[in-house]
Amino acid sequence: MKLDKPRDRYNNHRRYFDNIAYARSCTSHKKNNYDGSWIKPPEYFLLHKENIRSKLIETLDGVLNGNRKIDFLNVSALYPSGFIYFLSYIDYNVLSLKNIIARQSKSITVRQMLNYIKEGYLTGACTNFKNSNNEMISKWRFYSGESATFPEDYDEVEDFIRNHTKSDDDFLLINSAISEAVTNVINHAYSNKNNNKWWMFVGLNEVDNRLAVVISDQGQSIPVTVPIKATDRVKKWFSFEKMSDHDLIRIATIASRTTTGLSYRGKGLKQILDISKSIENSEVHIYSRKGLCCFGTKHDEKNTMDFKTPISGTIISWLLPLGGEN
Amino acid sequence: MTIYLDVAKDFYKRPAARCKVDGKYSGEEFREGILTKKIQEAIDSNQQLEIDFSGVTMAGSSFLDEAFGGIVRSKKISSKLLLNILTIKTKKESWKFEIIKYIEDAGKNKD
């Protein structure tokens, strides 16, 4: 192999040691006698394909039932919606990622992502992927909290949006909608107001000039709260118990009341969806309980459906082309 | 003559959420901590109140509604008087319209 350039020598050096780490991880189970007791998650962490979604949910059920050992060996891709669901579920129900024993993935990207998340939880600092030399990872930021106040390092996200949108108006519209989505979780997602946690991935894609925002909660889910929000008159018109979850999500996007029943509240979801209409080629996907509802300027009907296996809480996923100069 | 309130400098550049329990820089905190005092100052001295959102990078509907609609709902001032003394300076025109709407709606509901 010809290694003329310093970058080639670095990459080869790195691959060698990554392979060593991978080989060690394959044999560690023998040293620690873990054979036969590991939970094996699906190869992909995603929620939009039935069989893979079911396997991911089954993995989390296993963790909740007491098995803290997860074998990530064959996990090769962490889709944002699936991964944030995994993280939020474990964080909310198992109390800490520190309690999880993990076998490393063969995939360098997956391994690094999980290590960054773990480091963030262990140190209490915000997870910052930008130091990664992996392009797939370095564009992502991860935030979580129980209040609507964003940390100081969110400045970076604002700078990205501001520099990549056509106008101040677009920047303020998008940034305010992100804030409102988080506020929605705090105000409306949970019946118990003592634990209003939210989790958020933000993807800053310089190459495609796109912003990805994925927000998760572990609250009541939209299909649970819609029948609660409905007025008595509306309840006479609809049999909510017979409606699919994706129809209930759709109703929630046009309803103007909230669980509080007060007319001046409940604007958050509409504000979020208005963006998907005003920015070309943007998409919003809402996962809640069994339902998936898709919105956007290229609305895809076939991706609106109910799955067999419910998730807890709600995930809102946006993909926004920003349209400004790089 | 005008009294000025710079939201980013006098309060925070990223105000969010409705109630104090939801976050440090909520609409309720803004209303009770700064806005009410400035409005009273403007009324007492017969001046206009200009609220400058230029440095603010996010202002969701929850924050704006609780701050401006909330002050009318709390009966500290009528919607008519508030709209008379208030000027909003912002790069985002829709915030102006939103604020006016929340004030007007709060006035109607109060009546």
Image (cartoon, helix red, strand yellow):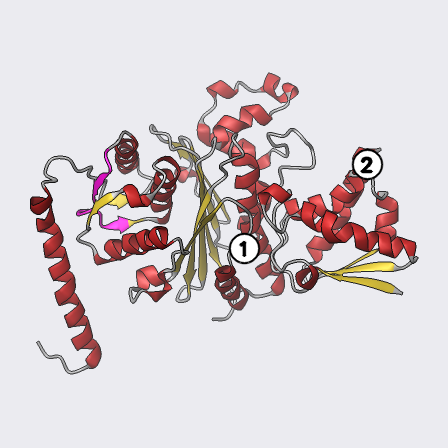
- Residue at 80% from the left image edge and 60% from the top image edge: B50
- Helix, strand or loop: magenta stretch: loop
- For residue A135, above or below residue B35: below
Is A203 placed left or right of A42 in the picture? right
Residue A279: mark in rendering: 1
Amino acid carrying label 1: it is: Ile
The residues colored magenta run: A67-77
Amino acid carrying label 2: it is: Lys
For the residue labelled by badge 1, is the local secondary structure a helix, a strand or a loop?
Answer: loop
Few, some or many C-alpha atoms within 10 Å of disc 2 (few <14, some 14-19, many ≥20)?
few
**Image quarter for residue A292?**
top left
Determine the chain carrying the residue at label 1: A
Residue B87 seen in this snapshot: yes
Locate the N terminus of chain A by quadrant.
Answer: bottom left
- For residue A176, above or below residue A3: above
Residue for badge 2:
B108
- Residue at 48% from the left image edge and 52% from the top image edge: A282
User: How many angstroms separate mark 2 from mark 1 (CA)?
Assistant: 33 Å
Between disc 2 and disc 1, the foreground one is 2
- Quick check: is A241 in the magenta stretch? no
Determine the chain carrying the residue at label 2: B
Q: Position of residue B27 (x, y in %)?
A: 67, 47
> Which of the two residues, A50 or A12, is positioned nearer the viewer here?
A12
- Residue at 70% from the left image edge and 44% from the top image edge: B66
Residue A95: mark in rendering: none
Q: Position of residue A57 (x, y in %)?
A: 30, 34
